[in-house]
Amino acid sequence: MNINAKLLLVVLLMIPVFSFAAAQCGAFNFTINENGKGIINGDMVTSQKVTFLKSSGDWNQIKLDMTLMPARDGNMYGYEFIKRNGRAFMNVELIRTNMEQQRIIGSFDCKRVPD
């Protein structure tokens, strides 16, 4: 196999990695930008904490805690993205402005989608 054929094979093998970089979790589209910050429905999160569930550096077993304050709709949201054992889901909470308000929380299974 010549060098051009090897290079073409490497490029073809990498296409699925780059084309499935986003997750659709209910109505929420979740991606990571080139700096490692989460982007939800086009808005960059305002804070983010990464926790490795098994071993450090294992990106297949992670929990991301994120907040978005404020989102485009004017509300504040807290997100918990969990990926483990080949499955991913996202918990979303509408952050209350006072303790008297009712809590609104949703949990959504995530599917890989093209960017």
Image (cartoon, rainbow, N blue to C red):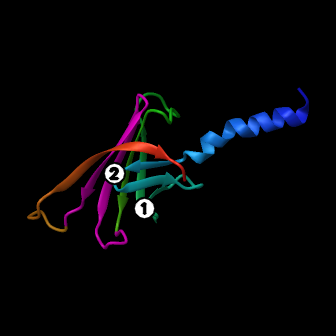
Residue 73: x and y in percent read 32, 72
| 87 or 57, nearer to the observer | 87
Q: Is residue 88 left or right of residue 1?
A: left
Q: How many marks?
A: 2
Find numbered disc 2 in the image and state the secondary structure of the residue it sits on. Answer: loop
Q: Which residue is mark 1?
A: 41
Q: What amino acid does circle 2 point to? A: Gly
* x 74%, y 40%: residue: 11
Mark 1 lies on a secondary structure that is loop
Decide which of tag 2 and tag 1 comes sooner along the chain: 2
As drawn, 35 above or below 109: below
The picture places residue 99, in percent across and down from the top left corner, at 12, 62
Rendered view: 7 above or below 85: below
Q: CA distance from mark 2 to mark 1?
A: 11 Å
- Residue shown at 89% from the left, 33% from the top: 3
> What residue do we see at 24% from left, 60% from top?
94
Does the stretch in magenta take in 78?
yes
Bounds of the magenta segment? 70-96
Where is the N terminus found, in terms of image quarters?
Answer: top right
- Residue 69 position (above or below residue 61): below
Percent coordinates x, y for residue 71 in the rendering: 36, 68
Q: Residue furthest top?
A: 1
Q: As drawn, is 96 to the left or to the right of 79?
A: left
For the residues bearing labels 2 and 1, Cβ distance under 8 angstroms? no
Question: Label 2, on which residue?
Answer: 26
Query: As displayed, is residue 92 above or below residue 100?
Result: above
Q: Nearer the viewer, residue 31 or 62?
A: 31
Q: Amino acid at mark 1?
A: Asn
Indicate left or right for 30 with 100 as reference: right
